[in-house]
Amino acid sequence: MKKIIRFLADFISFRLMKYFFTLFVFITTLSSCFQKFYDTNTVGKTDSETLKALQAEDKMFIIHTPDDAFVLKNIAVNDDVLSGNRDSPTTKYSKYLNPPSDTANNIRPLLKEMVLNEVHLYTKAVFRRNKKVNIEIGQIYRMDVYGLDEKATKESTRGGKLGITGGVGLIIGIIAVAAGGIHNVGHP
């Protein structure tokens, strides 16, 4: 029995526990804990005042048509027309082009600022690769203004804190049991 206790005590040494703790923290941070989420904030229509306000915030407008999606640059908003120059979205936007609007959507940390700056406008109009685009605001049947999903983000952070606290408690408990086993090895 003493050999088993000594083996466990040596196996669960402080040095080894340091590596377990580092591995635990690494795995926890890569899992679903501490992630950021965004909401699409979908509405069925928009107006020129809303579009002007979003333009003033320097939001990036992405237009969705039946054929494709593209970025609209050099935007101008009149009373009934949104206009600008067509530009192709880069591949880093592709994951965020058609997210589900009824669930929390994950943001990669490096792309958080970009994603939270997007406005997606949906129209049935077709522009046949025209460089200059004019969209009647009445033709926009859906608008998504991406924003931070605070509820899902807080739940993820709370879960991460609970997981780390539980893991640290478990590691401390194992160390305490191992330390108790070391002290009792020489005693009958």
Image (cartoon, rainbow, N blue to C red):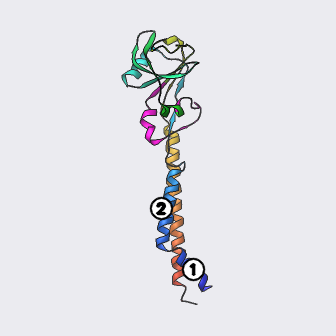
User: Which quadrant: the N terminus?
Assistant: bottom right
Determine the image quadrant of residue 76: top left
Image coordinates for residue 146, horizontal then vertical, percent: 48, 30
> For the image shown, how many numbered marks are present on the structure?
2
Question: Over which residues does the magenta segment extend?
Answer: 96-119
Q: Is residue 48 above or below residue 146?
A: above
Residue closest to the eye, 166 or 62: 62
Is 101 one of the magenta-colored residues? yes
User: Which quadrant: the C terminus?
Assistant: bottom right
Q: Residue at x 47, y 61 (%)?
A: 22
- Helix, strand or loop for disc 2: helix
Q: Amino acid at mark 1?
A: Phe
Determine the image quadrant of residue 187: bottom right
Residue closest to the eye, 150 or 67: 67
Query: Residue 85 vs residue 143: left or right?
Result: left
Determine the image quadrant of residue 9: bottom right
Of the two numbered discs 2 and 1 on the same chain, state the one appearing first in sequence. Answer: 1
Image coordinates for residue 154, horizontal then vertical, percent: 49, 44
Is 86 one of the magenta-colored residues? no
Residue closest to the eye, 151 or 58: 58
Image coordinates for residue 21, horizontal then vertical, percent: 49, 63
Q: Residue at x 47, y 67 (%)?
A: 18
Q: Amino acid at mark 2?
A: Thr
Query: Residue at label 1?
Result: 7
Query: Residue at label 2?
Result: 22
Q: Residue at x 53, y 41 (%)?
A: 152
Q: CA distance from mark 2 to mark 1?
A: 22 Å
